[in-house]
Amino acid sequence: MKKLSQKSLASLGAATAVPAYDRSAVRPGIVHFGLGNFHRVHQAVYVDGCLHQPGNEGWGICGVELIDVPATRAKAQSYRNQDCLYTVTEYAPDGSAATRVIGAMVDYLHAPDDPEAVLARLVHADTRIVSLTITEGGYNLDETTGLFKLDTPEVAADLAGGPPRTAFGFIVEALRRRREQGTGPFTVMSCDNLRHNGGTARKAIVSFARARDAGLAAWIDAEVDFPNSMVDRIAPQIPPEVKERLNQRSGIDDAVPALGETFSQWVLEDDFRAGRPPFEAVGVEMRNDVPAFEFMKGRMLNAAHILLAVPGILIGHRIVHEALGDQRLYRLLDNFLDRDAIPRIEGPQGVSLENYKKAVLERFSNPAINDQLLRIAFDTTAKIPVFHSRTLEMLLADGGDLRREAFFLACFGAYLNGRDDNGQSFDVVEPRLSEQDWELARGGNPIDLLRTSPFAKLGLADHLEFAKLYGGYVAMIQATSVGKTLETLLVETA
């Protein structure tokens, strides 16, 4: 296999698409925090497309890694060894695939090694966008109050002074310096999978700034753009065996290959006073109705994803397409989307919710993606309130069928025990559950799960019909199994 580098691009062969632009002329105009797989197969791919448009050499990406562990240091060195290049292999549901080399990232900084280098890049006049994929929970907002948490250790350390450690610390300090120098602000563009992501980023960053300097916070709030966006592409983890498979297929020795489905969507508000790449030329939908897309995706795709993951894991599945191949789980999702979600969603203008549903189920069925259910179930307590609460609220309000949601939450209670129907254990990662929440969840009264902090504000424990259904499914799961309970549910709701 051929080592991936700028020098080797010309020798990779016609089967692999490579950057057709002059990378030596590309300058960083975007600084990105959070170089996970999603960014690498989504935003970076769109930016790579923009760089193929003439006259856009100023829109390269400088990646920033904040975490200081051996794995991130090794990743940083891998990118440097490969001139910041990496491959993306896209698999269609029919099994066909294509590999391309992404050249959009032209610099990679490991912040713990040299925080001043990160600040210098952020302050540079060429930097006009700072983008974020720091996960849904990375914005440091209290789930109960919605306020930015100033007392978390890293945020408190940033506010105390010294080199920044967090994205908030770096962004606010850079904006302070730009304001002082008269450079003008950059745009902050969240690409995270949460509703109103631009508004969420604004709230977090302005709150952090206010804790430092009220005048600076007011300037940021007035002068910095925070466009909202809806982002969508499945980007699974790359364990060693998948890395080897991808490299064998491409014939390229890539230390950091990425894998994605062919489907990709990005709906973005056109709110960029500091300028932006020609996103609309590469398939980004520049629209002013982003919330309608957010609601559709969150309440259909994301809600169905976690609805598949939790009972799927408990039944004994570990891979998404295998779980959806279980006709019981397929029918659960199909019924949820048809009966619970779609009738209560007003979709974006010109978009068919039925066609969107078909696309969701087709994407989940893609065997090449090999996505892990445990990855999807990570931090479920952050996802259920975001992706299921509105549907639950509407079902409760209009007298809808509560059985599928009650079954789902009963499954989540069983999931917290970390053992499936077959007696196999699995890791449960729920960082948002406090010690008090865990005591409630494991205290012997199943209804108390509905009183834990992620679910308390939904009032489910006090809704007699829901609580009765939920308690019944908890008892049935304990007496039989999740699989048998799902079969009963499907018969009852046929």
Image (tube, helix red, strand yellow):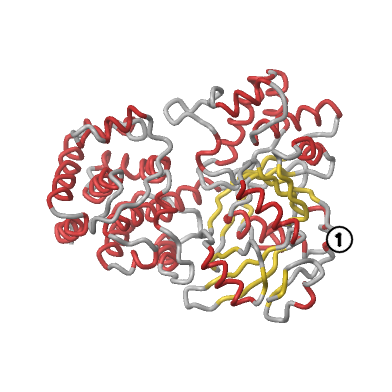
Assign the N terminus to one quadrant of the image.
bottom right
The residue under the point 36% across, 55% down is 309
Q: Position of residue 436 (x, y in %)?
A: 33, 27
Can you identify the residue that label 1 sits on? 24
Q: Is residue 55 visible?
A: yes
Which residue occupies 23% across, 59% down?
422
On screen, residue 197 versus residue 60, left or right, reads: left
Identity of the residue drawn at 30% across and 64% down? 330
Residue 390 sits above or below residue 216 on the image: below
Residue 4 pos. (x, y %): 73, 68
Seen from the viewer's position, the closer of residues 329 and 256 is 256
Can you tell which quarter of the image residue 250 is in?
bottom right
Q: Residue furthest left?
A: 479
Q: Nearer the viewer, residue 36 or 390?
A: 36
Where 171 sits versus 83, above or below?
Answer: above
Q: Is residue 47 left or right of residue 369?
A: right
